[in-house]
Image (cartoon, rainbow, N blue to C red):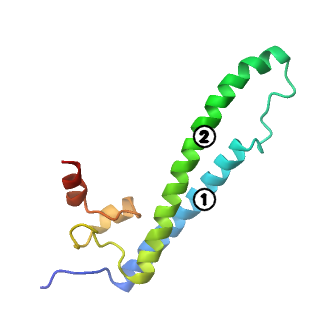
Amino acid sequence: MAEKTRYSDAELEEFRAIINEKLELAQRDYDLLKRSIMNLDGNDTDDTSPTYKVLEEGANTLSKEETSRLAQRQLKFIQGLQAALIRVENKTYGICRETGKLIPAERLRAVPHATLSIEAKNDGKK
């Protein structure tokens, strides 16, 4: 039996559903992070004593920096998922960009934006 070179349309539809679900959750998380950075959540120190406000400002700056890093990481994840949807449309989804072989479905279910098989990923770390 010949080795599969791509996933079937039915399998691609399963992956599309997984990707869309993760994309929706990721977008929701990203929106929450953005709101937090922009102080739209109403959690501010304006109504507390001036002394507390001074102490809080340093922690608030650190918190915003960390939240900003998390938002950037989340945006990168969203972009990876969007790129995966394009590969589903092109019927090239699940093909390792290093080896050209199919990435196992189990890996794609866990990491739907993966573009490398485990073997290729591990080879790149050496």
Q: Distance between the residues labelled 2 and 1?
A: 15 Å
The location of residue 80, given as percent across then percent down, is 46, 63
Identify the amino acid type marked 2.
Thr
Label of residue 67 in the image: 2
- Residue furthest to the left in view is 1
Q: Quadrant of residue 113?
A: bottom left
Secondary structure state at the residue bearing disc 2: helix
Image height of 10 relative to 93, above or below: below
Query: Which x, y percent locates residue 86?
Result: 46, 76
Residue 70: give x, y in percent of width and height. 55, 44
Residue 42: percent from the left, percent from the top?
A: 80, 39
Q: Residue, x 66% and y 30% (percent of image)?
A: 61
Q: In this view, does 45 lie above or below 101?
A: above
Residue 58 against residue 88 in the figure, above or below: above
Q: Which residue lies furthest to the top in this view?
A: 51
- Position of 27 with respect to 37 (left or right) is left
Q: How many numbered dots are placed on residues in this image?
A: 2
Q: Look at the numbered disc 1 and give the secondary structure of its residue.
A: helix
Name the N-terminal-most of marks 2 and 1.
Answer: 1
Q: Closer to the camera: disc 2 or disc 1?
A: 2
On-image quarter of the N terminus: bottom left
Q: Residues within 10 Å of mark 2 (few under 14, many from 20)?
A: some
Residue at 49 percent across and 72 percent down: it is 17
Q: In this view, does 30 lie to the left or right of 9?
A: right
Type of the residue with mark 1: Gln
Q: In this view, does 111 lie to the left or right of 24?
A: left
Q: In the image, which disc is placed on residue 15?
A: none
Within the image, what quadrant is residue 37 found in? Answer: top right
Q: Name the residue under label 1.
A: 27
